[in-house]
Amino acid sequence: MFPALFYGWWIVAASFLISVYVGCCGFFGFTAMIDPIVMEFGWSYTEVSFASSLRGLEMGILAPIVGVLVDRFGPRKIILIGVVTIGAAFILLSLTQSLWMFYAAFILLAFGGGGCTSVVTLAVVARWFRRNLGKAMGITVSGFGASGLLIPVVVWLIDSCGWRSAMVIQGVGMWVLGIPLALLIRNGPEEMGMIPDGAPPSKPGTATASGRPEIPDVEIPFRDALTSRPFIYLNVVEALRFTTLTAVVIHVMPYLATGGIPRETAGLVAAAIPLFSIPGRFGFGWMGDVTDKRYVMALSFSFMAAGLVAFHFAAAWWPIALFLLLFSPGFGGNMVMRGAVIREYFGVRSFGKLAGITLGAASIGGVIGPTLTGWVFDTHGTYNPVWVVFAAILVPAIWLSLKIRREDVPAF
């Protein structure tokens, strides 16, 4: 007889699949909508890009609130409400007749997305795992990377059925897939008479299988964590990361089109961005389990910066390939490290609130990145200066990552 699979891995699987769908339809796939909407309504790229920024701002405002709700009511209810709301937002988006209605649909999408973002999925994973946290979080956030598999489907739906019908299909699909998966979620192992990882932790100081000493579990009071230097630095680097990430994700297809790359090919590149991040999510997640997480974060940001420099030269194929091989694993690895650092440095009791605040800080970059990039194109007729500037702002992120030290947390 094979031993029963620890239920925490079923939680990871459900979170992974929800992330696949939400990541594609609610984030990475938006780039496929920009040109069709601009052509139908005659809006500028800045106006259309601002919808994504507005969604990011709204989610940033909601993220700390969602974090509090997760810690109080548990992730299961929050994910279920989020799934239902996202489906409704896509239906409303299909009915758009004006710019303000377009923005309203994205605000509703932000409300729903707040219930399905990494704040919630990583919060539930943090409750189920400790020693295997990096691996479990790596798999969970890889769902956003695997969402790239669906982007060609979204492009095909929009081009074949029109963007309005595509939105209806995506909304109904969210309900059909997401509701059953949300019902699989359990708030923590205690609900099922289990403990994290399915086995008791080792004694402090005992070496793990990797040879790294077992790190004692901690629970830092919320207020102490909130004002600690490591948490402040983490928020700053997340804002810088999200500034560059959202700018690339939203504008990748229009940018490649200016270089004469066909829409179908540009759609494949857009799909490859999250897909190529999967090795980074797994690889850097594993590295975070066996070595100091701040070094892993710094390495991830170095990958992103180098990839953006390559993206500047994306008129040729080899820089595009280099961009995908560097930028995507880099941002994927940092998604894992964000949650892993919060869990290791501050504990699980306030994980939702702290992760929500961090996502709120990131949303500031999510507002600046796409809107600034759209404004540059509308004003100068080119995207190129943006990518070099964005690569430069990641240098402080590398430096701050190295300063996120456990010794600077108050109660250590």
Image (cartoon, rainbow, N blue to C red):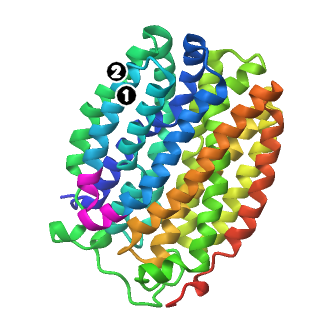
Position of 336 compared to 177: left or right? right
Q: Nearer the viewer, residue 321 or 401?
A: 401
Q: Is residue 3 shown above or below 80?
A: below
For the point 49% across and 53% down, the residue is: 60
Q: Residues at badges 1 and 2 in contact (C-beta under 8 Å)? A: yes
Percent x, y of residue 37: 55, 17
Range shown magenta: 68-78
Q: Nearer the viewer, residue 229 or 257?
A: 229
Disc on res. 21: none
Q: Amino acid at mark 1?
A: Phe
Q: Is residue 283 visible?
A: no
Residue on which disc 1 sits? 90
For the point 75% across and 68% down, the residue is: 399
Name the N-terminal-most of marks 1 and 2.
1
Percent x, y of residue 353: 41, 67
Percent x, y of residue 69: 31, 61
SS assignment for the magenta stretch, majority = helix
Name the image quarter holding residue 338.
bottom right
Whole-angstrom CA distance, mark 1 to mark 2, is 6 Å
For the point 78% across and 49% down, the residue is: 391
